Image (cartoon, grey):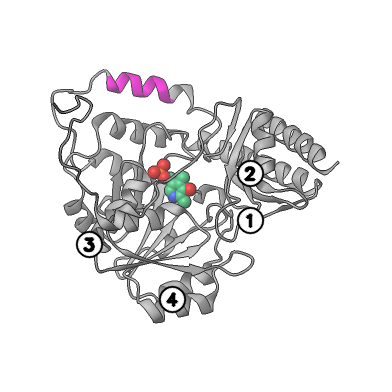
Amino acid sequence: MRSPSIRCDVVIQVRDDLRAMDGYHSAQVDVDVRLNTNESPVPPPDGFRDAVAAEVSRVEWHRYPDRAATALRAAIAEMHDVDPAQIFVANGSNEVLQTILLAYAGPGRTVATFEPTYQMHAQIARVTGATVVEGERAADFSLDPDEVDRIIDAHDPHVVFLTSPNNPTGLVEPPERVQQLLDRATGLVVVDEAYAQFADWSALDLVSEERPLVVTRTFSKTWSMAGARLGYLIGPTWLVSELEKVVLPYHLDAVKQIAGRLALRYIGDMNERVQQLVAERSRISDAMGAMAIDVFPSGANFVLFRPQAADGKTVWQGLVDRSVLVRDCSSWPRLANCLRVTVGTPAENDAFLTALDATLSTLTD
Ligand SMILES: *Cc1c(COP(=O)(O)O)cnc(C)c1O
């Protein structure tokens, strides 16, 4: 008799190319102060909750949502002063990226990234079956023009990713570097601007019908809406039409469409929060700079740092022991000993700085 614990007599194998892959990991540890995933430290304004609750009470739950997300796209388009047909919306900017890659990458095609950068670009590209080519950034983590030329000449990638401000380094790519990439690339250029509101310029002005360029944005960071999973891109209308073919029908539920549209009414509150976070970013950076730590300049809501005389992983653990969670980047290529801290509320940032100071003094005494 067969053992009852064996439920399946055929062991099926996942795709060969997926078998070798790791999933995306970010440690989830139960701590008081969570500064590891670059969310907003504060919830959306109270008025937003009430407005969403009122509209959600009138949702026609038995009907499919507006497939074209007309009202939400119109509101986003108005904010950016573009045509609604230039906006594609999905469940988080990660789904926007996935849809781009399903449409323009996939088996037999090549996707380029410049490392170190946001790991999901390469990850999602590989899941679609594309070949990923990883270029290297310069020593200061900016785009290296010669490396851009080398990658494009050697591989002629169908899709090239650029993250500005870059994650996890925080670096804002100078406009002339983005322009150089645009001039050289023959495929689609994706500028991931998840942190655009914290930076001093955006590639949005470069978007036009004549150029294969898209800029992606998210509600997860600045808009205090990571729980909703909403992101979008601004790009040429012909490209948006192609993406509409690829994405699942009714992918964006009615509640999310409401929440996204109403959030945009609170842009004033959002801008105020951005100002506060930028001020706190300077305060944390200065405080760490006074602590035997190398601090990388940031145009985002997080700061990458490297303790000079202590092992990064040990510092990460020291912070966890003091109930503060930051992102451990110390095992990533080019980021030996580096950690990344999200800018939190002033109280959270104080807790982080105190824990960091205490950790470093026990390690270096
Ligand atoms: C956080 C982040 C995103 C956001 O993804 P969502 O799916 O919208 O939550 C996208 N790109 C970068 C570079 C990020 O850091």
Question: Is 139 in front, or is 40?
Answer: 139
Measure how far apart labels 1 and 4 are at the Cα level: 24 Å
- Label 3: how many Cα within 10 Å (few below 14, some 14–19, many 20+): few
Give the mark nearest the N terminus, 3 or 1.
3
Instruction: Tell me which residue sits at (29%, 58%) in the image.
Output: 17
Q: Where is residue 149 drawn, in percent x and y? A: 46, 79
User: Residue 55: within the magenta?
Assistant: yes
Instruction: Tell me which residue sits at (55%, 55%) in the image.
Output: 332
> Mark 4 belongs to which amino acid?
Ile
Q: Kindly check if marks 4 and 2 are in contact, taking CB atoms under 8 A apart as contact.
A: no
Question: Is 198 in front, or is 141?
Answer: 141
Residue at image mark 3 = 238
Residue at image mark 1 = 336
Q: Kindly check if marks 3 and 4 are in contact, taking CB atoms under 8 A apart as contact.
A: no
Front disc: 2 or 1: 1
Whether residue 194 is visible to the viewer of this picture, yes or no, is no
Measure how far apart labels 2 and 1 are at the Cα level: 26 Å
Residue at image mark 2 = 278
Q: Where is residue 34 drawn, in percent x and y? A: 58, 32
> Mark 1 belongs to which amino acid?
Ala
Instruction: Tell me which residue sits at (52%, 39%) in the image.
Output: 37
